[in-house]
Image (cartoon, helix red, strand yellow):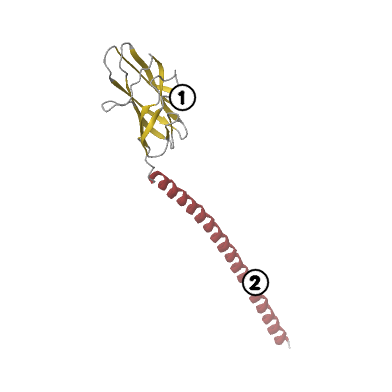
Amino acid sequence: MIRTEILVEQVVSDIKQLKQQTNDAVETVEKMKTELREGFQNMHSENALKLEEYKNTIQEWKDRQELKPDVLFLAKDPTTQRPSYNTPIIFGTTMYDMSQSYDNTTGIFTSPLNGTYAFTAQICLNHGNGIFIHYTIVANDQHVTYSHLNDKSHRFCNTAQAFVVLKRGQTAYVASRFSSSSPLSANTDSEWCTFSGILIH
């Protein structure tokens, strides 16, 4: 009888021990599952952040590599031989304008892109004694170059150039500072008054 009781106690003890080991194993598995779940979540979050960074980097690279549209124009034929003081000289005939940025009704070029631009103005004098003109290229409301022509007997042309940095929406034009009566030559087969510009970079 005593042996039976001892045996029963041993079996009960073994069962309790086995149950505890089972519970410990279950807890260990659950802990491992939780750690794996959290690890996967962290990896997913980190990978999502890295993927977003890669996408942004690729987009920045594409933006830098993307070909910019051609910005290039040339206009001629001043609409008046006597431009008003400090106002745009209007070159009324657009020979070409790749970005549709020059307005031949106002004489004003409006930058379609941020960048460095080169502008050139060629002004030709009318014939007559005492004819003269002071003119300037204006970019972003700042005078960036000045030029002066005068001649007592012969017509001739003068060219001024300016390199400027413009933001999108800023403007450039040629303006008369002061002049004699009707200083600008009408365009002929041998000489043109022109205004041109190009996006360099």
Q: In this view, does 134 lie above or below 61?
A: above
- Residue 193's tag is none
Residue 139 located left or right of residue 158: right
**Residue tagged by mark 2?**
23
Residue 131 located left or right of residue 140: left
- For marks 1 and 2, the one nearer the N-term is 2
Extreme-bottom residue of the structure: 1
Q: Residue 96 location in percent, x, y?
A: 35, 37
- Front residue of 78 and 138: 78
Q: What residue type is labelled 2?
A: Asn
Specify few, some or many for label 1: CA neighbours under 10 Å numbering under 14, 14-19, or 20 or more: few
Residue at (51, 52) in percent of width and height: 49
Image mark count: 2
Residue 31 located left or right of residue 166: right
Q: Residue 76 location in percent, x, y?
A: 35, 29
Q: Is residue 190 above or below residue 201?
A: above
Q: Is residue 102 above or below residue 148?
A: below
Residue at (38, 14) in percent of width and height: 181
Q: Which amino acid does label 1 sit on?
A: Asp
Using the numbered discs, state the Cα–Cα distance from disc 1 to disc 2 in whole angstroms.
Answer: 82 Å
- Front residue of 60 and 32: 60
Q: Quadrant of the C terminus?
A: top left
What secondary structure is found at the residue carrying circle 2? helix
The quarter of the displayed image where residue 191 is located: top left
Specify few, some or many for label 2: CA neighbours under 10 Å numbering under 14, 14-19, or 20 or more: few
**Residue tagged by mark 1?**
141
Residue at (57, 63) in percent of width and height: 37
Q: In which quarter of the image is the N terminus?
A: bottom right
